[in-house]
Amino acid sequence: MSEMKYTQDHEWVRAEGDAATIGITDHAQTALGDVVFVDLPEVGREVTAGEAIAVVESVKAASDVYAPIAGRIVEVNAALVDDPGLINREPTGEGWFFRIEASEPAAIAALMDEAGYAAFVESQS
Amino acid sequence: MVPFAGYAMPVQYPAGILTEHLHVRSQAGLFDVSHMGQAELVGEGAAAALERVTPADVQALKPGRQRYGLLMTPTGGIFDDFMVANLGDRLFLVVNASRKHEDFALIEQGLPAGVRLNRLPDRALLALQGPGAAAALGPVAPALTALTFMGITAAEVAGVPILASRSGYTGEDGWEISAPAEQAEALAKALLALPGVMPAGLGARDSLRLEAGLCLYGSDIDETTSPVEAALVWSIGKRRRMAWDFPGAERVREELANGAARVRVGLKPEGRQPARGHTAIHAPGGGAIGEITSGGFGPSLGGPMAMGYVARDHATDGTALDLMVRGKPLAARVAPMPFVPHRYAR
């Protein structure tokens, strides 16, 4: 399994095979609170980096989830529809959102590493 | 913690909104609502003096009883909503934090000689809410469990002199407890030590009141909404509706006779997706007929819920409507409120 990368929008990205699995970080799920609904993108959709493509609704508020990289949606986590609490319980595991086949695989390597993300979160608090 | 009306307010405690909400419905939660404005109106003719700004029947309120009322604008809008209690020798008022300065100025304006308003900025307000509150409180404060819904009494809890009414903002049995600010922490600790009591924040307070169909001032009611539109005519005294002697009576009378153009209703979206405040409401496949004023997910309801204003033709329970969430129609129906039944100790 490859190294996990991060965005300033609090998404994590993990390259696995020819696609990257994406979810929201533990920090993000803590800030959101209990998730009650997720709106996922359609499989096959072409997305650009930074585009809002999913919505996560917690008991507090609705938040956008952005595509960290450009590419095509190849899979979404259907388990979240019936059990959105997975995002709170296992944000970096079973609570993943979608998989993107990157149009430019190098874009993943350019994202923040774990130490970089930790420093970013620290700087925001 | 978030800033709210000049106070640092806890949205949630470590348990989180969902757990706090469900705990209040199953056992009991303690809320710190000290941001609310408290005051007393003292002197001969205080009740009549208050009736100059509210259509509530204050003069018929018996000692030891509290009621819900509206402060009105001259043109029939809602200036604020509030609680008034008759303490025998004075009236006790609780108003919204965001409106307290305006409310107190409105009430004070042109008070007759001999009636005066005492603001009580040095009093805290705690709310103990939930079906387990009575069993927890009974052993330490029998005077409070002797009250029925909307009863009020002075008492002592954990050595702290308090003023408590059997009321709240959750739809559950419970008490709102006014105490001197310097003793509020000791009181809160004593109440939190009672069996089954957990701290609950503003987030749970909001989802609980929405499930109970209760209005939030500034969202669901404001200076543009009338008591008829807001479905709060029940708070207008029968005597007041005969005399029409309150600010804005003309609009209320006209809307009662001919119907209001829009009315506040409950809404249940299909599925699990919530629709929040300011979401446009459309007739199915048609144009805008209203707007959501409060919306979210009801943890006890187990689904999304909202309230808002719709054109009168679309206000009947069961009417199908579209909620325009992020540009897409979300199917919903007009639904009776409360979404979760009230369980008051009547």
Image (tube, helix red, strand yellow):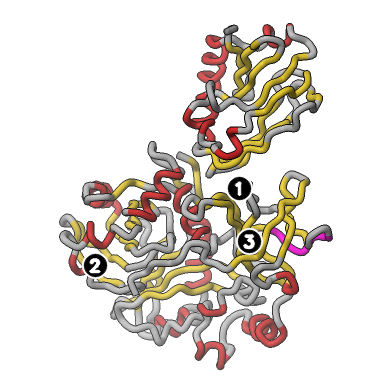
| Residue at numbered disc 1 | B272
Q: Position of residue B309 (x, y in %)?
A: 68, 65
Q: Dot 3 falls on which chain?
A: B
| Residue at numbered disc 3 | B267
Task: Please tell me if label 2 and label 3 are on a single chain.
Answer: yes
Q: Position of residue B8 (x, y in %)?
A: 44, 43
Q: Is residue A3 magenta?
A: no
| Start-end of magenta stretch | B286-291
Q: Is residue B252 visible?
A: yes
Local SS, label 3: strand
Q: CA gap, disc 2 to disc 3?
A: 36 Å
Q: CA gap, disc 2 to disc 1?
A: 40 Å
Q: Dot 2 falls on which chain?
A: B
Q: Looking at the image, is B64 positioned above or below residue B170?
A: below
1 or 3: mark nearer the eye: 1
Residue drawn 22% across the image and 51% down it: B194
Which image quadrant: the N terminus of chain B? top left
Which of the two residues, A24 or B177, is positioned nearer the viewer here? A24
Q: Earlier in the sequence, mark 1 or mark 3?
A: 3
Q: Earlier in the sequence, mark 2 or mark 3?
A: 2
Q: Neighbour class for label 3 at 10 Å: few (<14), some, many (≥20)?
A: many
